[in-house]
Image (cartoon, helix red, strand yellow):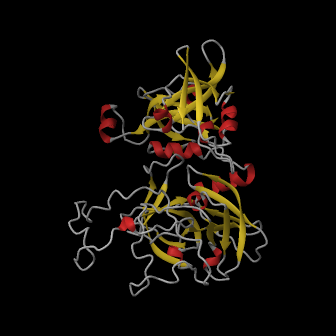
C-alpha cells in the first residue's frame, strides 16, 4: 500500500450535473495538445466512456471574470494569448457536466469515508476507486449540507488503512500537505503552510471556521486530506478562492475536529444534532472596548437574545459580553457559534459574562437547534432564513411560530414575517416543526403555506 492510499480514495459519481466554484468552462477542454478536436475527449483513461469530471464547492458565477489581476476592467479580455481577436465565444462551447472528488478513510474496519457534501450532491450512484485501481459501490450514510460534510461507506475492501486524526491544534506558519485528485490526474500531494485559521464569512449556513492554506488545491481535490508533517489529518480540503477556477494559493479546509465530530454523529445517530444558545452578537472592536471601558477587546457583545432560548432562560441579556465558555476564552461571534454548535443538545455549560462592569457566571442548558439539524438522506433546510419554534396562535391553535426572519433569504422573499404562525402546508396541519419536516420530506413542487398574522388567515405560495 502506498502513501496516498492511507489518506484517501477517489470518489466518482454517475450521473449528475455539477459546476466548479465560478462556473467557468474550459475553452480548450475539447481539444488535444495540438489544438485539434480530441477524438478521445469522451473517453476515460481506460478508453471507456467517461461519466466523470471535477467539482468545486460553491458554484457561484465568476465575479472577476472580466477584470484584470488588479481588479480593473481587462482591456485584453477579447484577445487570445497572442493579442489577436478571439475567434470564438466561450459561451458557445458546450459545457461538460461531470463529478469527481476525493475522500478520506476514517474507519478501515467498517469502510467509512469522509468527503464533502458538494462532491456527492445529486449523485444517483457513487463509486470509490482506491489507489490500487479497485472500485467499490459506496453507500451514503449521511450528510450535512450546511457544513459541506458527507459520510459514505464501502463494503468488501481489504487491507484499508485509516488516517490518523489530529485535533486541528495548528498555528499560522505550520507546514502542511494537501492530498487529492486534481483534474482527475490521480494521487497528488502538494505542500504549503497554514496561512490563517478560523476563516469565516463565506455565507455557509453551518459552522464556519476554515483553515486557509497556500498548498495547491484544484478541481477534483475537494474532500481530500490536509495533513501535518506527522501524517495526521488536520482538515478536509473544501474550497478555493480563484478568479478562474484554478489554484491561486488561497485554499480552505474544514478543521478535522469539526469534520470528525459530525462524522461520529452521522455514524451514531444518522443525523447532526447541533446546539443553540439563541443569541445574536458581534465581536468587540478597539473603539467599542474604549467606549465600554473594557480592559481588552476580547469577547462577544450580545445584541439580541432570542425569546424562549437557552440564553434567555439562563438570564443572558442584550448588552452582555460573553468572555468565557467552560473557562475557555471567546474572541469573536463565529468562535462562539462554532463552540456551541459542537456541543450536544442538553449539555450544561458555564458562561462568564460582563454586565455593566460586573463579572457574572451563568449556567446554561443548551437547546437543540431544530432549524439546522439535518437528517441522513432526507435533508431539507426548513425555510432558510426563518427561525422557528413550536407554539400557538393568540386563539390557542397549535402551530409553528416564526421568531425571526433574515433579510434577503428564502423566508424573507416568500413573505414570512416575525410572529407569523404557520398552521398548515399544502392543506396539511403543522402543529409542530416535525409535521413540517414530514411534509417537506417529499420535496413537493409547490408549497402553499397557511399562516395566521394578526388574526388574519393568509396563504403564501412558494414554487
Q: Nearer the viewer, residue 83 or 435?
A: 83
In the image, residue 30 above or below residue 386: below
Q: Position of residue 154 (x, y in %)?
A: 73, 67
Q: Quadrant of residue 165?
A: bottom right
Dividing the picture into quarters, in which one does residue 382 lie?
top right
Residue 205 spot, x, y in % from top left:
52, 46
Residue 171 visible in the shown view: no
Does residue 217 appear anywhere in the picture? yes
Between residues 378 and 14, which one lies in front from this camera angle?
A: 14
- Quarter of the picture containing the N terminus is bottom right
Q: Where residue 133 sits: x, y (%)?
A: 67, 81
Q: In the image, is residue 347 above or below residue 167? A: above
Residue 79: image location, x then y, percent: 25, 72
| 310 vs 113: above or below | above
Q: Residue furthest right?
A: 156
Above or below, 290 against 456 in this view is below
In the rendered image, the quadrant that contains the C terminus is top right
Q: Which residue occupies the extreme top position in the image?
A: 395
- Residue found at the far left of this picture: 75
Q: Nearer the viewer, residue 97 or 140?
A: 97
Q: Tell me which residue sits at (49%, 69%) in the image.
A: 219
Total labels drawn: 0
Name the quadrant containing residue 295. Answer: top left
Amino acid at each position: 500500500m502506498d502513501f496516498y492510499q492511507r489518506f484517501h480514495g477517489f470518489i466518482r459519481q454517475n450521473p449528475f450535473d455539477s459546476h466548479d466554484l465560478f462556473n467557468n468552462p474550459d475553452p480548450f477542454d475539447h481539444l488535444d495538445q495540438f489544438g485539434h478536436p480530441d477524438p478521445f475527449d469522451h473517453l476515460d483513461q481506460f478508453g471507456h466512456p467517461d461519466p466523470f469530471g471535477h467539482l468545486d464547492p460553491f458554484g457561484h458565477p465568476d465575479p472577476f471574470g472580466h477584470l484584470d489581476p488588479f481588479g480593473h476592467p481587462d482591456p485584453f479580455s477579447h484577445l487570445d494569448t497572442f493579442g489577436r481577436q478571439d475567434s470564438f465565444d466561450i459561451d458557445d462551447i458546450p459545457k461538460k457536466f461531470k463529478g469527481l472528488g476525493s475522500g478520506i478513510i476514517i474507519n478501515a474496519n467498517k469502510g467509512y469515508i469522509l468527503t464533502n457534501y458538494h462532491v456527492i450532491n445529486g449523485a444517483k450512484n457513487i463509486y470509490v476507486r482506491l489507489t490500487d485501481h479497485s472500485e467499490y459501490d459506496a453507500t451514503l450514510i449521511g450528510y450535512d449540507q450546511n457544513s459541506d460534510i458527507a459520510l459514505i461507506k464501502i463494503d468488501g475492501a481489504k487491507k484499508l488503512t485509516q488516517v490518523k486524526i489530529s485535533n486541528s491544534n495548528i498555528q499560522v506558519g505550520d507546514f502542511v500537505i494537501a492530498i487529492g485528485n486534481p483534474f482527475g490526474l490521480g494521487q497528488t500531494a502538494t505542500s504549503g503552510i497554514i496561512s490563517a485559521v478560523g476563516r469565516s464569512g463565506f455565507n455557509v449556513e453551518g459552522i464556519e471556521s476554515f483553515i486557509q492554506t497556500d498548498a495547491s488545491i484544484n478541481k477534483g481535490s475537494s474532500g481530500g486530506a490536509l495533513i501535518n508533517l506527522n501524517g495526521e489529518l488536520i482538515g478536509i480540503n473544501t474550497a478555493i478562492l480563484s478568479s478562474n477556477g484554478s489554484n491561486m494559493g488561497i485554499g480552505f479546509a474544514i478543521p478535522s475536529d469539526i469534520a470528525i465530530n459530525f462524522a461520529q454523529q452521522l455514524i451514531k445517530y444518522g443525523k447532526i444534532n447541533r446546539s443553540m444558545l439563541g443569541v445574536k452578537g458581534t465581536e468587540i472592536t478597539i473603539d467599542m472596548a474604549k467606549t465600554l471601558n473594557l480592559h481588552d477587546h476580547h469577547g462577544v457583545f450580545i445584541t439580541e437574545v432570542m425569546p424562549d432560548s437557552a440564553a434567555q432562560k439562563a438570564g443572558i441579556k442584550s448588552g452582555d459580553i460573553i468572555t468565557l465558555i467552560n473557562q475557555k476564552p471567546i474572541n469573536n461571534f463565529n468562535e462562539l457559534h462554532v463552540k456551541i454548535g459542537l456541543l450536544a443538545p442538553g449539555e450544561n455549560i458555564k458562561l462568564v459574562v460582563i454586565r455593566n462592569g460586573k463579572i457574572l457566571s451563568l449556567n446554561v442548558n443548551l437547546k437543540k437547534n431544530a432549524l439546522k439539524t439535518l437528517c441522513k438522506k432526507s435533508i431539507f433546510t426548513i425555510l432558510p432564513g426563518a427561525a422557528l419554534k413550536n407554539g400557538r396562535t393568540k386563539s390557542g391553535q397549535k402551530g409553528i411560530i416564526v421568531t425571526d426572519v433574515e433579510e434577503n433569504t428564502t423566508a424573507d422573499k416568500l413573505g414570512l414575517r416575525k410572529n407569523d404562525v404557520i398552521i398548515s402546508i399544502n392543506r396539511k396541519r403543522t402543529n409542530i416543526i416535525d409535521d413540517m419536516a414530514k411534509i417537506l420530506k417529499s420535496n413537493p413542487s409547490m408549497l402553499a403555506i397557511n399562516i395566521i398574522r394578526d388574526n388574519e388567515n393568509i396563504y403564501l405560495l412558494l414554487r
